[in-house]
Amino acid sequence: PRLMAALNWSCREFRELTLHELYSLLQLRTDVFVIEQNCVYQDMDDNDQVAMHVIGARDGELLCYARILPPSIKYKTPSIGRVITHQTLRQNGYGKQLMGKALDYCRQYWPTEPITISAQQRLQKFYSELGFVTESGPYLEDGIPHIQMRYESLPS
């Protein structure tokens, strides 16, 4: 893929995903979280059906993805998780773009709610730079050190 070439961004409910998109996002999540990070866990957790799916694609190829869960699913607040940038696009600003889109969608649906994430501890600086504040010490999630972080929604 070309450096910083534009992606087409969308945010869709589960029922709005095409079968191709669903297959692609599950494949990307498995490629990164199960294979690349060597982490055996059940990715399909019955939350996809209630989630909003943020997709960054180019020429029909899904390259960035995040899942937004409404309040009271994982936390009392909305949450963003399963944040992925395709291996070939990393270190080029796409992750920040993806999180920016996810935060925009959260503000659109829940304008006054803070947003909670369970971040891999090694990515604490990345999320801090986006405005997230650390709320917990490290804990293991699927064998990987994580921290809970929170983003206070700004009044529009």
Image (cartoon, rainbow, N blue to C red):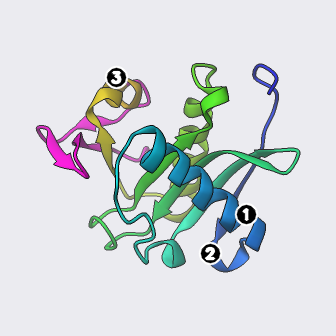
Residue 131 belongs to magenta span: yes
Question: Split into 4 quadrants, where in the image is the N terminus?
Answer: top right
Query: Residue 70 placed where, x, y %?
Result: 43, 69
113 shown above or below 65: below
49 or 23, nearer to the observer: 23
Which label number is shown at residue 125? 3
Residue at mark 1 = 21
Residue at the spot x=30%, y=27% of the render? Answer: 122
Identity of the amino acid at label 2?
A: Phe
Q: Which residues are magenta?
A: 129-156
Q: Which of the 4 quarters of the picture holds residue 146?
A: top left
Measured Cα–Cα span from mark 1 to mark 3: 30 Å
Which label number is shown at residue 44? none
Query: Residue 89 placed where, x, y %?
Result: 66, 27
Can residue 33 be seen here?
A: yes
Dot 3: element: helix
Dot 2: element: helix
